Image: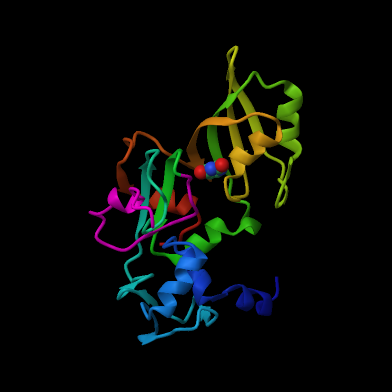
Amino acid sequence: MTKVDTALNQLKTLERVISKAGLGSRTQARSWIHARRVKVNGKVVENPDHWIDFQRDRVEFDGMPLESKEKRYILLNKPTGYITTFKDPDGRPTVYDLIADVGTFVSPVGRLDLDTSGLLILTNDTQFAERMTNPEHHVPKTYLVKAVGPLPEESLGRLRTGVELSDGPTRPAKVVRVRDSEKYTHLEITITEGRNRQVRRMLEAVESKVLKLVRVRIGGLGIGGLGIGKWRDLEAGELKGLGVEL
Ligand code: URA
């Protein structure tokens, strides 16, 4: 990648920065920007297509900086029934209800569906979040899956090589059969992309359905003994493993 490519990669529209920070959808981001709730370098910006340079620009939402000097990296063991955005128009519980005592504004690194549980990193380091979620970086994410039906080896083979989804074929995945019963198959699936509802859609593509989905690993980081609904700061060694230089 050339220097010019790198510089262009760092530019994002304001709307995208807000939605990428995990605050809400791009439509919500646009409405908040129009409602003058977003400042860039201390000034209200009403144009959702305003270009932001991560290296230089400081973005605030409702007076809270999206990124602050003190970097925080939180690991949450997300229960099912919580959504991964800041505010839910339907008033459902959000992951922010579980991390109210963190003391700094942090945003989820990627999303987990309402019905998915497990490992979720939250941070105020937007560059780190961008690196972890950028599909070009192929960060592996591992899920335990309980799926409908005894899945034949042929279906697992298709999941491994890639299945066709509405937004294109999936990259090769690591798929390990954990155990089978008459009605269900338990799998461990590692993917290097993070598309919307990807694992659920992959299983639908092989005529099955996900009944339970738990994220157990991101890169080299596991959930360990962290209780469900609990959070903790990531340790220096764990951060190093994720490529964070302290
Ligand atoms: N894949 C899904 O289908 N859902 C998630 O929450 C995460 C990965």
Which of the pair 242/7 is nearer the observer? 7
Q: Quadrant of the C terminus?
A: bottom left
Q: Total of numbered circles in the picture?
A: 0
Magenta-colored stretch includes residue 93: yes
User: Where residue 234 sits: x, y (%)?
Assistant: 36, 50
Which of the pair 87/214 is nearer the observer? 87
Q: Is residue 233 above or below residue 71?
A: above
Which residues, given as a range, are shown in magenta?
Answer: 89-113
- Name the residue located 59 percent from the left edge and 24 percent from the top edge: 148
User: Where residue 211 sits: x, y (%)?
Assistant: 52, 29
- State the colouring used for the structure image: rainbow
Q: Quadrant of the N terminus?
A: bottom right
- Helix, strand or loop: magenta stretch: loop
User: Where residue 25 sits: x, y (%)?
Assistant: 49, 62
- Name the residue located 47 percent from the left edge and 82 percent from the top edge: 56
Magenta-colored stretch includes residue 133: no
Q: Is residue 162 left or right of residue 68?
A: right
- Name the residue located 70 percent from the left edge and 52 percent from the top edge: 167
Say whether residue 127 is visible. no
Which of the pair 34/100 is nearer the observer? 34
Q: Is residue 200 left or right of residue 129?
A: right
Which residue is situated farthest in the bottom direction here?
43
User: Where residue 194 sits: x, y (%)?
Assistant: 58, 50
Q: Place residue 115 in its image quadrant.
A: top left
- Name the residue located 41 percent from the left edge and 73 percent from the top edge: 32
Q: Is residue 111 above or below residue 37?
A: above
Q: Place residue 224 in its image quadrant.
A: top left
Tell me the quadrant of ligand 1: top right
Q: Is residue 106 left or right of residue 153?
A: left
Which residue is situated farthest in the front direction here?
90
